[in-house]
Amino acid sequence: MLIKEGKKLRTTSRGRDPKLAPNGCRHSSKLAGERESWVPRGVSSYHSFTAESGSNALVKDVDGRSYIDFAGGIGALNVGHCHPRVVEAVRRQAQQLLHMAFPVAGYCAYAKVCRRLCEAAPGSFPKKAALFNSGAEAVENAVKVARSHTRRPGIVSFDMSFHGRTYLAVGLTGKHKPYRQKFGPFPGELYRIPYPYAYRPPDGVRAEDLTRYCLGRLENLFSTSIGPDQIAAIIIEPVLGEGGFVVPPADFIPSLRRVCDKHGILLIADEVQTGFGRTGKMFAIEHSGAAPDVLVVAKSLAAGLPLSGIVGRAEVLDSVEAGGLGGTYGGNPVACAAAMAVFDILEEERLIERASRIGKKIERRFDALVRSCPTVGESRGLGAMRALELVEDRKTKEPLPESDMKAILSDCAREGLLIIRAGQHGNVLRCLVPLTIPFDQLERGLDILEAVLRDRKP
């Protein structure tokens, strides 16, 4: 059943129809018509309702229905919707300075966020940071600094990876549909190798041999396509995001770090979705014990406001000449104020520790579904970054069809739960609950998901 809220929708705006939502849509069907008329089909949504407001882990639509949010703005809301401290920080900053453009003149909020990033990022070496707007933009700037520092052209990424939608970022991305189809040609000197995926290893490869296999493919790349002395960086998601929340073997990233060190290649960690406590560490790569040369952040950095950044070795970032990095909106003061509030919230509310507790609760429920639900092929994840891979047949591991996946998402929404999917075949349910979610809401959301999956016929 949907979560009912007792308060009626109302507005204090003079002359406004009290039934009219702030976004101008009386109900969700109104937006559907507007979208059909004015928004291209390439800009799509998982769900058809029209959101009106959000508070912590609850979202209300313009029809007055409420939902438990397991999507978390695709990982951008680790501190929840409209955290009061974030809202207050934004309000104060908006009254003082909305925009300056850091290339014109500096302001304190930008430097403060960079300092907090440098303090939080793994690695005992001196660090610096720079701020941008989106995860894709940060990825592109990480590539720029890597090429500037090494004077090499090549960049290696992984199959099933996702690094953004701009041309260089989508060129690095290892999923064709929908991100790459019909958009080529892409920038050159980009190469990909397999990501270790234990549930679906290559034919003839045992799960325990995946690290050796994938690094062997990297060595093959060195001998057939581009020499290691021409590779500037290898970019990796410590846990795949859009690729389906795949966690690599424990020895994979440390082994990759050693290969990079051997050949003078920089290691870039894309922590856009995994960062800021999601996996039970500030950054997911910390689980491996390896430190990247450059770390990419966005999403939960500013509680959903457009802010991203790169943080890494000072000599790497300083290799770019003055004016080579920046942008009109990068490090906007309002977004920076939100980010400073996020850092404080993570620390004072001990959300990184809480992520581990949330993750254990989800893992326990998801593991039970593997045992009891025929369509659940695997439960996996790290910390509060959890997923279920759904299949038609456990023996063949045939992915559950798209129509079934869409029906599951729709059934969950009808019962009051927002959840989204991922994976190379779109058959992975991914869970990105706010780390601030009350445990009773977490359990209620898991109850809804379990009931929907159990009701599906095998």
Image (cartoon, rainbow, N blue to C red):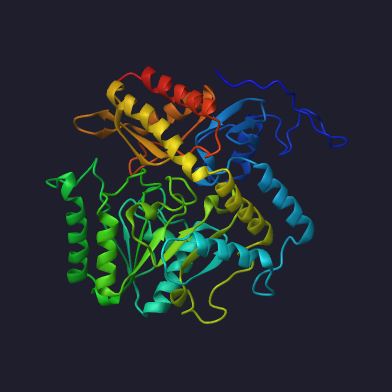
Is 358 located above or below residue 270 in the figure? above
Q: Nearer the viewer, residue 258 or 48?
A: 258
Q: Nearer the viewer, residue 211 or 356?
A: 356
Q: Quadrant of residue 373?
A: top left
Q: Position of residue 132 (x, y in %)?
A: 56, 63
Q: How many marks?
A: 0
Is 258 located above or below residue 81 in the figure? below
Residue 109 is at least partly visible in this image:
yes
Q: Position of residue 284 (x, y in %)?
A: 40, 51
Q: Quadrant of residue 340?
A: bottom right
Q: Nearer the viewer, residue 53 or 29?
A: 53
In the rendered image, the residue lying farthest to the right is 14
Is 147 located above or below residue 216 in the figure? below
Q: Position of residue 298 (x, y in %)?
A: 52, 55
Please report the residue visible at 23 percent of the width from the left and 42 percent of the height from the top: 200
Is 39 located above or below residue 15 in the figure? below
Please report the residue visible at 78 percent of the width from the left and 29 percent of the height from the top: 10
Residue 428 is at least partly visible in this image:
no
Which quarter of the rendered picture does the N terminus lie within?
top right
Q: Is residue 17 left or right of residue 263?
A: right
In the rendered image, the residue lying farthest to the left is 204
Q: Position of residue 275 (x, y in %)?
A: 47, 52
Please report the residue visible at 58 percent of the width from the left and 71 percent of the height from the top: 326
Which quarter of the rendered picture does the C terminus lie within?
top left
Please report the residue visible at 70 percent of the width from the left and 52 percent of the height from the top: 90
